[in-house]
Image: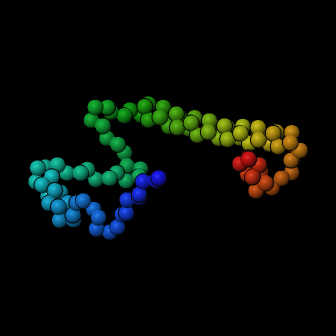
Amino acid sequence: MAAPKRKRRKGDSTITLEAAKIAWEELEAAGIVRPPKRKAGEEIVCPMVTVTPEMAKRYDEYLENMKNEKKRLKAQYRIDRDKALEEMGLENCDQDTIEKIIEV
C-alpha cells in the first residue's frame, strides 16, 4: 500500500508573510544583509589575491583549451558514430533516424 501524497495548496506554508518580514527586519537591524547578486561579466574581487596580467592570460588560455577539447571530443564522437552506422549499413540516414537508432 502506497503512502498518501501530501496535498499542497495555497496557504499551507508554515511561515507567514508577516513573520518573514519581521525576521528580515531583525536581520537588517543586526547588520546582516544579503549581498546583492553579481551581474554577468562583473569581475570578482578577492582581497587576498591580486590577479596579474599573466594570471589572466593563463586563465584565458585554459578556457580556450577547454573549449577546443570539447569541440574535438564532439567531432570524435560524430566520427565514431558515423563509422558505427556505416558498419550497420546505414550510411545515408536522416538525423531523425540516427537519433532513434542511438536511443535503442
Residue 17, percent from left and from top: 21, 65
In the picture as drawn, the residue positioned furthest to the left comes out as 29
Residue 3 in view (yes/no): yes
Q: Residue at x 37, y 53 (%)?
A: 39
In the depicted view, which residue is nearer to us: 37 or 50?
37
In the picture as drawn, the residue positioned furthest to the right comes out as 89
Residue 103, percent from left and from top: 71, 48
Residue 61, percent from left and from top: 53, 34
In the picture as drawn, the residue positioned furthest to the front comes out as 1
Residue 21, percent from left and from top: 18, 62
Residue 95 in view (yes/no): no
* 9 left or right, relative to 82: left
In the depicted view, which residue is nearer to us: 6 or 92?
6
Placement of 84 over or under 10, stated as above or below: above
Q: Residue at x 76, y 41 (%)?
A: 81
* 31 left or right, relative to 2: left
* 41 left or right, relative to 72: left
Please tell me in which quadrant of the rendered image residue 13 appears: bottom left
In the depicted view, which residue is nearer to us: 5 or 86?
5
* 64 left or right, relative to 43: right
Q: Residue at x 38, y 32 (%)?
A: 52
